Image (cartoon, rainbow, N blue to C red):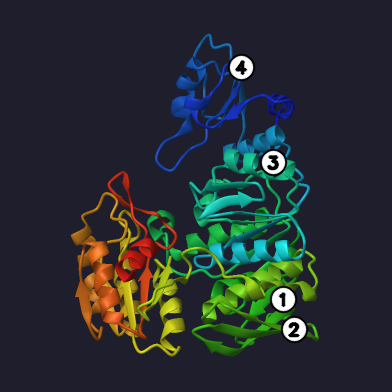
Amino acid sequence: MVRNHSFEELLALAAAGLDVQADSRRVTPGGAFVAVRGVSVDGESFIPMALERGAAWIVASPSAQLPAGSAARLAVVDDVPRALGLLAAARHGTERLPFRLAGVTGTNGKTTVTYLVEHLFARAGLRAGVLGTVEYRWPGHSQVASHTTPDCLTLHALLAEMARDGVQGAAMEVSSHALDQGRVEGLTFDAAALTNVTQDHLDYHGDMEAYFQAKRRFFTRYLRDPSGAALNLDDASGRRLAGEFPQALGFTLTGQAAGGRVLSGRVLRSSGEGMELSMELEGRSWSFASPLIGAFNASNLLAAQALGLCLGLPDSAMSGLADCNGAPGRLERVPNGQGVHVFVDYAHTPDALENVLTALKVLDFTRVVALFGCGGNRDRSKRPLMAQAVARHADVAVLTSDNPRHEDPLAIIEDARPGLSGAARVIVEPDRRKAIALALEAAGKGGAALLAGKGHEPYQQIGDEKLPFSDALVAGELLA
């Protein structure tokens, strides 16, 4: 980014405590307003409001102009999101964090991998933190997450608070939206993992190549050193990045090789109670048992270990994952006395449903019932693909409502329904609570019921209203 004297002066003021905002409603007298272009609105249109609230500095693109007679200073920059990141880092002292920071990007697995890395840190005796879809948490602090990756200013403020609280290692989810919008600007990651890239968010990115390029940016722009990259060689996008970053540490369950360092894993034993996993890297080997189930979780365990190794943890620390149950709402069991194996999972993409159902199908359940829905105001093209994944693997498919948002739930169901043409048995029930009851009944004793799509979420969003609703709590109530 081209920097000028005005911006350098503003950076010094931010480091001395000047208030910096990207929301004109939060501007304080004498502070700075950064006019970032958003998805649907341009921050420059809010410059008059920021000035009314007493902004002394405006940071904007070369096209911006201040009203005649304005006493505010204009700092013109060619990359406004980058400027916001640099100001956030100066304001919060996060240019150089006093702890190791790991980031995870990918369509599926981000939440589980960050929880596993946090667990690795804790088992290694470090004060650990995690930022992601479920929560922002570290010792002495916990809050429900507003976004998978917070906005730039909030993110820097959270990391600064972690530093003040003595955190020694943190893992965070980095979404493709965040990368495209520059929410992690001003940060440098010590390690970064790619779990996979499969169809999702095409309503935002437009096509798979643009989606991939957003993920790629994490490694080209924000990673301290290419040797800190942990790449899934079982995924085509992971192999593509490995060709670009030969210093990276690849990880694989299928024996893929990329010519560089490769962490190879093998599932020795798998059941409904968990798995035993063995690892090999550069002639060294180790193994441990995990309560997590499914090949996709074996891959998540490899990703977490690859990140740990990139951050300097020894092989001996990897067994610390043996007692980690993963993340809330990620193949989370719902205990009950009825003999029904109930799992709540956040799977809301075709690939995620494919992975979790494949994992359940090969285990010793009498039948597998899959309840799913599709989110409103999201990529419509994936709806029949999600249904196809369910039809391929479930003995009973239960199609219901997810978070319809501003769409008609019945119209969403009709978008998905064609994908169920090959299903063995189909139940359609728009009322999610009633649908869960039908899924549990269909599973019966010894069967598995997958309640997919909402995972940890404690609400169902209809319009702009988030109504209290938890798949795990509802299933528990129905089986009590």
Quick one: SS at disc 3? helix
Question: Horizontal placement of 309 versus 417: left or right?
Answer: right
Residue 41 falls in image quadrant: top left
Quick one: SS at disc 1? helix
Which numbered dot is residue 160? 3
Whole-angstrom CA distance, mark 2 to mark 3, is 36 Å
**Marks 2, 1: nearer the viewer:** 1
Q: Earlier in the sequence, mark 2 or mark 4?
A: 4
Circle 2/circle 1 CB separation < 8 Å: yes
Residue 415 falls in image quadrant: bottom left
Q: Earlier in the sequence, mark 4 or mark 1?
A: 4
Q: Earlier in the sequence, mark 3 or mark 1?
A: 3
Q: Among all residues in the image, which is located at the extreme top? A: 69
Q: Amino acid at mark 1?
A: Ser
Q: Amino acid at mark 3?
A: Ala
Which numbered dot is residue 30? 4
Give the residue pinned by disc 1.
319
Q: Looking at the image, which residue is at 54% across and 62% down?
A: 111
Q: Earlier in the sequence, mark 2 or mark 3?
A: 3
Which quarter of the figure is the C terminus placed in?
bottom left
Circle 2/circle 4 CB separation < 8 Å: no
Whole-angstrom CA distance, mark 3 to mark 1, is 30 Å
Q: Earlier in the sequence, mark 4 or mark 3?
A: 4
Whole-angstrom CA distance, mark 2 to mark 4, is 58 Å
